Image: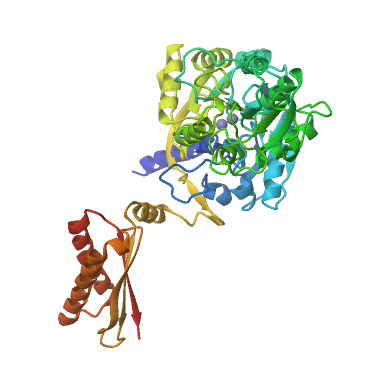
Amino acid sequence: MKRKDNRLKIKERRSEEREKKQLKLIPLGGLNEIGKNITVLEYQNDMMLVDCGMSFPDDEMYGIDIVLPDFAYLIKNRAKLRGMILTHGHEDHIGAIPYLLQELSLPIYGTRLTLGLVENKLREHGITGDLRTITAGEVVNIGLFRIEAIRTTHSIADSLCLSIDTPVGKIFHTGDFKIDYTPVDGEPIDFRRLAEIGRDGVLLMLADSTNAERKGYTASEKVVGMTLENIFRGSDSRIIIASFSSNVHRVQKIIDTAVMFGRRVAVSGRSMINVLNLAIELGYVKIPAGVLVDVNKIRHIPDKELVVITTGSQGEPMSALARMADNDHKAVQIKKGDMVILSASPIPGNERTVSNVVNKLFEKGADVIYSDIADIHVSGHACEEELKLIHMLIKPKYFMPVHGEYRHLHRHAVIAEGIGMDPANIFILENGQVLNLTPNRVNISREEIPAAPVFVDGLGVGDVGNIVLRDRRLLSESGLIIVAATLEKSTGEIVSGPDIISRGFVYVRENEDLIESARVAAEQCLAKCSKNSVRDRAAMKTAIREELRNFIYLKTRRNPVILPVFMEI
Ligand SMILES: [Zn+2]
Ligand SMILES: [Zn+2]
């Protein structure tokens, strides 16, 4: 018996030892969603992060401004957290940084443009951070992790993929990427370095899955440039172009094309102006003197000599382009003959708002060109053939698709299998799951880390949860009915009321009968409570709620939120 005990103990100790020597990789966001990318790497007493992004709310999240990852695990382990490295400057990779820095501090590594965008963001929040600039090709140490930053191509300049040396082996993270052989800045992916890394042996690869469902290759940014030239060549109209402000290469191309055709450039929209200023300051965008013109001073410039670059390519209601479409823009009024170009595709979920803006622009007589009818936009993410190329170069032993909804992750796994990867070596995780890695074994742990979305509404972070959202949804669907009554404190007798107040339910003036009969029903319900000696206020409220819910459903087939309110005197 005793010997058995000993053997068990030895076994336990061995498994503890093994656990100590394994790397934990935890996606806190970015899986089964496009947004809030953040990945934790943890080995014993050292922890690092790759990216710290936010996501935008979907239509069901009433009143929510943005969505953050859950930082609870990071706050709990703050003493271990050695730093963060950023792959690039898109919101879904940097947007949550100001909120994390309000909880803890850590060094943040990134390229110049990425950190420039982070700095702008921190300034808006009135905070500072420990930002450390790196360049592609450089190696940095974060705790015991050694990270090589490698140039890649994406829809924002200065993007990186990462080769991370850990005690259990090399982990390769593609970041967001596409393979552009002819990028605007002339700096393609460092393929030779990728091949060397692959040859040295990669334990695990994490790779962008956004476009895994698309066959073939993503076109080069150069294609957009050629389309733009063709449009400019054939046009005497004023040209207004909406694009993502962060796509500084696209913005540069628009400016170059304008210069080529003797047009001056005005810029509209706060984020476009901010990012452009930053990009000019850091040397990512170059504009010849005399080309830029204040958007408020364009009146005297002939149409065929002007281009307006603006925000609003996603139809965002407050954006400059949406205001132009609504006749609500101070400097730019859309008129017949204007040429409007939407140099972006709607992000899934934004199709309707984009379509609204396009319709309004056409109604005002503008000629609108968008990505369905011309090559005016190319994606920043790799399609199937590009993904295959990366897999072939890196040749990882294990693979984890990231950055995508479940269908994208699944499709990426199928692609990897198709080029010979053992399906047992592919891991599709959920946010908060833990991947355990040793040099020769990888498995999904039973451990789960909290990773539910955290909602930001106004100044509140995390104070709006699912119950509040459910109420907001109910209110938005059928409105609200308040039953107000004044009761005598000791006896519970009605002193005055009940009165019915409603919002968003029916138009009261046209439904006086309905409201009056609801009032009578509430009154009878209270009388019944008093007859049956029900004095408990909560029980009385429940009775009213039930009574009115049935009554109103019977009359209207609607389910408004019913809120009994008692005043006691
Ligand atoms: Zn990106
Ligand atoms: Zn991204």
Which is nearer the eye, 150 or 164?
150
The quadrant where ligand 2 appears is top right
Looking at the rendering, which quadrant does residue 179 occupy? top right
Horizontal relation, residue 250 to residue 565: left or right = right
Counting from the top left corner in percent of width and height, residue 335 is at: 60, 32
For residue 129, above or below residue 351: below
Counting from the top left corner in percent of width and height, residue 3 is at: 38, 40
Horizontal relation, residue 244 to residue 213: left or right = right
| The C terminus lies in quadrant | bottom left
Image coloring type: rainbow
Which is nearer the eye, 410 or 427?
410
Which is nearer the eye, 449 or 134?
134
Q: Is residue 258 visible?
A: yes
Which is nearer the eye, 154 or 509?
509
Horizontal relation, residue 491 to residue 133: left or right = left
| The N terminus lies in quadrant | top left
Counting from the top left corner in percent of width and height, residue 538 is at: 28, 73
Counting from the top left corner in percent of width and height, residue 140 is at: 72, 32
Q: Is residue 111 visible?
A: no
- How many numbered markers are drawn? 0
User: What residue occupies the far right of the structure in this picture?
Assistant: 289
| Residue depicted at 25% across the width and 74% down the height | 540
| Residue depicted at 45% across the width and 21% down the height | 412
For residue 488, above or below residue 68: below
